[in-house]
Each structure stands twice: as structure tokens, then as C-alpha cells.
């Protein structure tokens, strides 16, 4: 009996994950990526012979990869060299700076030195609430196969519902943070998590405070850079028989009588397929860029875009200015940054700047 053929469009982390799992289970899998290398947003730029991570740089929730590799009879930590960081990030406001640590008690002490005993107590309360929000949403949303509002309400239960009602789930993140952080600098710090999903703390829901708990569960560095993760997944998928094609653009998805037949490449080649996984911008389907029939596969195209980032990849000489691996430099006029982006549709005049110092594993634990 012939194997079920699957074509995956897009070699980002989701497409690669599907490729590895399907190949492991015996499917005939072909992944097509238009760029020279797989990884999607996870990418490196070569700067004078050094590979600089130029997409995602903060590696959390490693349990996702532990489970993926285990399901494919592998061990993530044996395949990818990682190291847990003791300092999550260092934050700067002009002359002031604050470290957050993997150890919550050390972060609390640092916050007390930075902003006083009351703020230390409120920070610990925030940590408890963030944990409860994460625990409430882990099963119905984070690990949900196809989460919906109805399925979430059904699975939340009484304790989960109480946790969400406590923070005001329909309130903006910024509004909810006010009760925990009278120090506006810390409100900036924890409001920054909204940008992880391309939003503004003034618009994003309060439930995004769960990201704080995620980071406190652990942040890791990847020895060869973040690019090692997609490269490893691609290697394991190919070892299981998957075909990965790079430098090829998919022109259209071929269909017949509302069933897929395959994908047509720019080269003219047709890749036959019984099923197709699309790992790309949903707007490409809903606007018909991959064929008129694909419009039916998705809801109406979104009318807005999430924010992104302007990235510089560089090597600079070390100097006396101490950096951790992850560093955030805040401006005083915080709301203006998001007014510029979301209302004025322009680059912010006074942006927050994030620096990933890729060669640093730890900063001085006593420096905050």
C-alpha cells in the first residue's frame, strides 16, 4: 500500500515539527521552503565569519521540544547543546538597572533594593497570580489542539475561572499591571511581554502576564545559536525519510473537486500530495496567492498586522559596559512608542532597545 503523501509549505519551526513527526510515523513527507535554509523567523546572519541570531533569541518552554523529541525516540538535550541561564535579563532606565533571575527569591531581593519593600511584596504577589493564570490556561489553551472560547470555558473549571476573573481577563495588560507595580519602571518591564506576540501592553489582554511565569520556569541559551534547533529537527526528519527542498517558491496549490492534488513550484515541478500543511501567513491563502481554491480554506484575511522589530546584527568590541545575555533599555516616554507604531504607523521616535549579547552566558549576580 502506498504511503500517504504530505506536502508542507514553509520551513518555519511549525512546518519542521510537523515534518519530523509525520516522517517518524511513516508518512511520505516533502517540505518546501523558499529561503536557502530552513528555520523561518529563526535565522542567523553571518557577520565577519560569526553567526549572529537575528530572529528569536529567548529560548523558553523547552518542555515543548522535550516532548517532541521524546515522541520521535530522541533526546532533545543530547541533540542540541543548551545551558540554563541564572540571569533572565538585565533592564536599564538611564542610570538605573535591574536584573531578573531564574531564582524568584533573588529577583525579589533585587527589586527590594531597586524599588523598596512594598514593591518586593507586590512582585511576589504578581508571581503567584501569573502562575495561577498559566496553570489555568495550560491545558485548555497552551496545550489545546484547537482551542476555542467554548472549549476554554468548559475546561477551565471553577479554580481556573476564578484565577482569570481575579486579573480581569478582558482588561488590557497595562491596566492589570497597575495593581502590582506602583513603580512605573516595573510596569514597563512586565508590560513588555505583550510585544512577544506583536502587540501593545495598552491593547493586549491581561492574560499575557503568564509569560512572566514561563520565563521564571527557565530561560536557556543554545550553544550554536537558536538556528541549531531548526537545523537539528530538519536533520532528524531527513534521517527518517523526509525530503526537504529549499530555494523553491510554491506558486499554487493544485486542487480537483475540492481535494488537494499537490503543489506547483516556481520551477514548474509538481509535488503530488494527498494532504497539505501550510506553515505561512494565513493571508496568503485567504487572498488567493496560492490559487483561488485556497480562499475557502481559511477565514477572511485579517485587516491588521502585528508589530515586528527592526534588527541590527553586528559584532562590537567588548568594553567596560556590563551586559547580560539579554538586555532591555527602556525610554521614559513609554506610551509614545506604541502610539507611534499603532496609531501613527511609523517607527517609534524613542524606542525600547533590546540587545542579545550572544557571547554572554551570565552577568555578575551581585550587579543589579
Image (cartoon, helix red, strand yellow):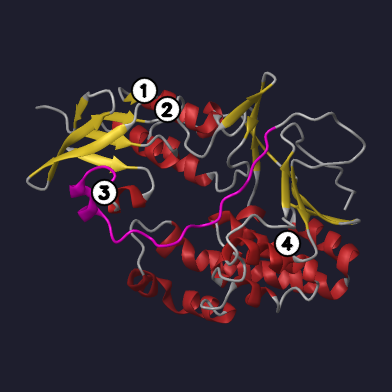
* Quarter location, residue 2: top left
Q: What element carries label 1?
A: helix
Of the image marks 1 and 4, the number of the one nearer the N terminus: 4
The foreground one among 68 and 97 is: 97
Q: Position of residue 91 (x, y in %)?
A: 79, 54
The residue pinned by badge 3 equals 288
Q: How crowded is mark 3: few (under 14 residues within 10 Å), some or many (20 or more)?
A: some
Of the image marks 3 and 1, the number of the one nearer the N terminus: 1
Q: Position of residue 323 (x, y in %)?
A: 82, 41
Give the residue at x 55% y 68%: 204
Label 1 to label 4: alpha-carbon separation: 42 Å
* Quarter location, residue 234: top left
Query: Foreground mark, 1 or 4?
Result: 4
Answer whether labels 4 and 2 touch (C-beta < 8 Å).
Answer: no
Is 294 one of the magenta-colored residues? yes
Label 4 to label 2: alpha-carbon separation: 36 Å
The foreground one among 355 and 16 is: 355
Give the residue at x 81% y 69%: 120
Give the residue at x 71% y 34%: 358
Compared with 240, 58 (above or below) is: below
Give the residue at x 55% y 44%: 62
Answer whether labels 3 and 1 touch (C-beta < 8 Å).
Answer: no
Amino acid at each position: 500500500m502506498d504511503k500517504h503523501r504530505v506536502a508542507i509549505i514553509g520551513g518555519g519551526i511549525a512546518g519542521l515539527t510537523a515534518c519530523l513527526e509525520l516522517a517518524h510515523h511513516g508518512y511520505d513527507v516533502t517540505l518546501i521552503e523558499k529561503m536557502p535554509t530552513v528555520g523561518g523567523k529563526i535565522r542567523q546572519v553571518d557577520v565577519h565569519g560569526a553567526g549572529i541570531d537575528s530572529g528569536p533569541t529567548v529560548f523558553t518552554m523547552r518542555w515543548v521540544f522535550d516532548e517532541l523529541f521524546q515522541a520521535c525516540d530522541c533526546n532533545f538535550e543530547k541533540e542540541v547543546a543548551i545551558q540554563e541561564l541564572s540571569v533572565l535579563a538585565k533592564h536599564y532606565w538611564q542610570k538605573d538597572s535591574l536584573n531578573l533571575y531564574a531564582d524568584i527569591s533573588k529577583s525579589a531581593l533585587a527589586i527590594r533594593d531597586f524599588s523598596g519593600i512594598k514593591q518586593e511584596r507586590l512582585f511576589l504577589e504578581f508571581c503567584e497570580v501569573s502562575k495561577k493564570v498559566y496553570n489555568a490556561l495550560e491545558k485548555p489553551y497552551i496545550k489545546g489542539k484547537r482551542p476555542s472560547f467554548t472549549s476554554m470555558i468548559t475546561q477551565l473549571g471553577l479554580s481556573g475561572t476564578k484565577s482569570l476573573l481575579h486579573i480581569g481577563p478582558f482588561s488590557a495588560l497595562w491596566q492589570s499591571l497597575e495593581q502590582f507595580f506602583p513603580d512605573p519602571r516595573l510596569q514597563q518591564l512586565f508590560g513588555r511581554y505583550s510585544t512577544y506576540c506583536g502587540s501593545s501592553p495598552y491593547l493586549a489582554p491581561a492574560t499575557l502576564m503568564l509569560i512572566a511565569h514561563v520565563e521564571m520556569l527557565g530561560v536557556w541559551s543554545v550553544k550554536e545559536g537558536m538556528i541549531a534547533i531548526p537545523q537539528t529537527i530538519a536533520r532528524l526528519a531527513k534521517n527518517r525519510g523526509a525530503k526537504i527542498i529549499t530555494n523553491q517558491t510554491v506558486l499554487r496549490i493544485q486542487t480537483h473537486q475540492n481535494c488537494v492534488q499537490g503543489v506547483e513550484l516556481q520551477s514548474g515541478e509538481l509535488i503530488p500530495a494527498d494532504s497539505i500543511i501550510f506553515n505561512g501567513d494565513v493571508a496568503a491563502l485567504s487572498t488567493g496567492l496560492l490559487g483561488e481554491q485556497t480562499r475557502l480554506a481559511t477565514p477572511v484575511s485579517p485587516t491588521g498586522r502585528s508589530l515586528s522589530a527592526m534588527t541590527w546584527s553586528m559584532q562590537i568590541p567588548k568594553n567596560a559596559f556590563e551586559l547580560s545575555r539579554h538586555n532591555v533599555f527602556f525610554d521614559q516616554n513609554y506610551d509614545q512608542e506604541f502610539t507611534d507604531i499603532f496609531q501613527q504607523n511609523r517607527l517609534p521616535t524613542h524606542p525600547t532597545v533590546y540587545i542579545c549579547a550572544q557571547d554572554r552566558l551570565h552577568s555578575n549576580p551581585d550587579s543589579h
